[in-house]
Image (cartoon, helix red, strand yellow):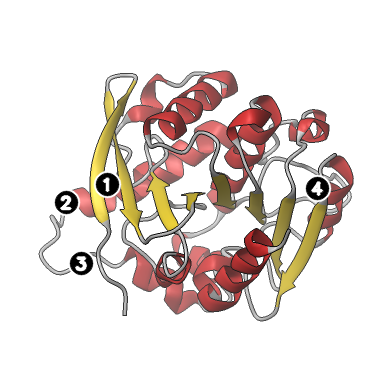
């Protein structure tokens, strides 16, 4: 049973960005995956049992207002996210991300290595292998997306179902805006040439991949591990899809907690 986190707001480029905070202990930041987080999740509650979990939204994602509309280049996005992390109190903290958010976490660790402690990447976007291309989530019919994101489509549907009392007009607009914002970062085909910067990542890092990921094939775990200079640990999460933190919250949080607690 999840409980609500503390909510605050920071401003970047003139737009408000929601920041969630919950738990006690050493701080870890989390950047959400495709579609963002319209609500707090069981995975975040699991992490918050032993960590202070800080979750800033990405511009344009749920809680990120229309901040994506002024970001015209990949550099714009990276600078905005660096500002968000600083304002949220995450400079120097351990940093985790899933999917879209994992790609941004990897970029920050590469370009500003002193601002990231340990790094956790859950099936990040950013690479493109022509022999085994990722799925294009923007090219899918709406009813296919839940099964693309999660091994259990009902988990995605529950995440995106409007809460009781939510504004019936604003809620779907926010969800569509999140897809648009992600497309602005990763068009075309999710390829940001991240492979050119992976070697700059020196932080100890954990790569987590759902064994049933239908977006980023499991082979991409090897591509990331080979490209990163820092010591890399790779774990495959049984029964999980692309957003493994949603499918298997206890297992993913457990892997992260074990990694952070190790030497």
**Which is more N-terminal, label 3 or label 4?**
3
- Residue 169 is tagged as 2
Tag 1 near tag 3, CB within 8 Å = no
**Which is more N-terminal, label 2 or label 3?**
3
Task: Work out whether 189 lies above or below 223.
Answer: above
Please rate how many residues cluster around mark 1, counting C-alpha atoms within 10 Å: few if below 14, some from 14 to 19, many from 20.
few
Q: Which residue is mark 4?
A: 224
In percent of width and height, residue 143 lies at 46, 67
- What is the quadrant of residue 1 in the picture? bottom left
Q: Which residue is mark 3?
A: 163
Visible residue check, residue 31:
no
Tag 2 near tag 4, CB within 8 Å = no
- Is 193 on the left-hand or right-hand side of 50? right
Visible residue check, residue 109:
yes
Q: Secondary structure at mark 1?
A: helix
Q: Secondary structure at mark 3?
A: loop
Q: Nearer the viewer, residue 40 or 50?
A: 50
Q: Nearer the viewer, residue 218 or 52?
A: 52
Task: Work out whether 107 lies above or below 144.
Answer: above
Please rate how many residues cluster around mark 4, counting C-alpha atoms within 10 Å: few if below 14, some from 14 to 19, many from 20.
many
Identified at 39% across, 43% down, the residue is: 56
Q: Nearer the viewer, residue 142 or 112?
A: 112
Closer to us: mark 4 or mark 3? 4
Q: Which residue is mark 1?
A: 173
Identified at 57% across, 51% down, the residue is: 96
- What is the quadrant of residue 200 in the picture? top right
Tag 2 near tag 1, CB within 8 Å = yes
- Is 118 on the left-hand or right-hand side of 185? right
Identified at 43% across, 39% down, the residue is: 180
- Is 170 on the left-hand or right-hand side of 156? left
């Amino acid at each position: 049973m999840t409980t609500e986190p503390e909510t605050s707001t920071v401003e970047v480029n003139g737009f408000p960005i929601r920041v969630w905070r919950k738990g006690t202990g050493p701080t870890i930041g989390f950047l959400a995956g495709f579609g963002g987080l319209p609500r707090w999740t069981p995975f975040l509650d699991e992490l918050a049992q032993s960590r202070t979990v800080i979750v800033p939204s990405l511009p344009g994602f749920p809680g990120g207002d229309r901040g994506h509309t002024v970001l015209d280049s990949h550099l714009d996005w990276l600078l905005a996210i660096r500002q968000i992390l600083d304002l949220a109190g995450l400079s120097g903290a351990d940093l985790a991300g899933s999917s879209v958010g994992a790609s941004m976490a990897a970029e920050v660790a590469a370009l500003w290595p002193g601002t990231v402690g340990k790094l956790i990447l859950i099936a990040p976007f950013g690479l493109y292998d022509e022999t085994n291309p990722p799925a294009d989530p923007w090219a899918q019919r709406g009813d296919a997306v839940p099964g693309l994101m999660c091994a259990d489509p009902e988990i995605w549907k529950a995440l995106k179902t409007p809460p009781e009392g939510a504004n019936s007009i604003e809620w779907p607009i926010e969800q569509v805006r999140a897809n648009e914002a992600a497309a602005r970062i990763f068009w075309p085909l999710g390829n940001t040439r991240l492979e050119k910067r992976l070697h700059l990542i020196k932080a100890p890092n954990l790569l987590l991949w759902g064994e049933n990921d239908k977006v980023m094939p499991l082979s991409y775990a090897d591509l990331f591990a080979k490209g990163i200079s820092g010591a890399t640990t790779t774990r495959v999460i049984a029964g999980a899809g692309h957003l493994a933190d949603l499918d298997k919250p206890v297992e993913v949080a457990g892997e992260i907690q074990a990694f952070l607690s190790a030497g």
